[in-house]
Image (cartoon, rainbow, N blue to C red):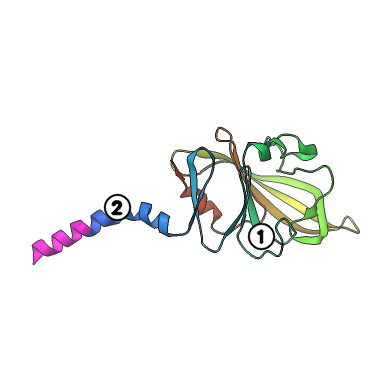
Amino acid sequence: MIKRIISLAVVVTALGALVPATAQASAGQVLKLRKGLTITLPYAWKVRGKGDFVYVVAGKCKKLHEPGCHQFSIYGPKGIAVGDELFEPYTGESPYYPATDVQPCPLNAKWSYGGGVKLLTSGYRAIGKGHKAQYRAWRITCVANDSSKVRATFVQREWLLPKSKILIVDKFSTAGLSKVLTNAVWR
């Protein structure tokens, strides 16, 4: 009886070692990106776009890119090349903002970006094993379109992998995104 229990424990332990790889493949939809980066998304998240402009809808959304559409973006080299104001290349010195004019606030169409930007956090975060992204979190203000009164703030999180030329931008503090990126796999 003791031999059976020990044998069973060995089998369970051996199977347990396989669970992370197997669980990742069955836990959600697999999204393969540049340079061998593979992330597993919850089934409820919907992928739109392709190539250098991938958008993941992770919540309520009537229309992609419209205020209130809870999404995050994954950019390749072409998206990074136009990611700063006036469509200059994104450097991380300011938030990702590919525009020449005032943009609608992602929280409400009746508001616009208000110019109030503050860097909250800067450092490195793991994206999969052995890869560190340059991470920044910015607090950005939104003002009423008919006045300069601040109506809301939001945090825009950005992960940049400069060697792989991948940039992830999240304006909605998407729950679970950090864990999805930490659990990414490089092939």
Residue 29 locus on image (x, y percent): 49, 57
Residue 168 locus on image (x, y percent): 61, 46
Predominant SS of the magenta segment: helix
Closest to the observer, 158 or 21: 21
Identify which amino acid the numbered label 1 is placed on: His
Which badge, 1 or 2, is on the more N-terminal residue?
Answer: 2
* Residue farthest along the right direction in this orientation: 146
Report the magenta residues as a range: 1-11
Residue 178 locus on image (x, y percent): 54, 52
Residue 25 locus on image (x, y percent): 41, 55
Residue at horizontal 62%, vertical 40%? Answer: 76
Name the residue beneath numbered marker 1.
70
Point out the image quarter for the C terminus. top left
Closest to the observer, 107 or 186: 186
Graded by Cα atoms within 10 Å as few (under 14), some (14 to 19) or many (20 or more), the crowding at tag 1 reads many
Disc 1 to disc 2: CB gap under 8 Å:
no
**For residue 103, side relative to residue 64 (left or right):** right
Examine the structure image and report whether residue 119 is included in the region drawn in magenta.
no
* Residue farthest along the front direction in this orientation: 50
Secondary element type, mark 1: loop
Identify which amino acid the numbered label 2 is placed on: Ala
Secondary element type, mark 2: helix
Graded by Cα atoms within 10 Å as few (under 14), some (14 to 19) or many (20 or more), the crowding at tag 2 reads few
Which quadrant of the view contains residue 151?
Answer: bottom right
**For residue 124, side relative to residue 115 (left or right):** left
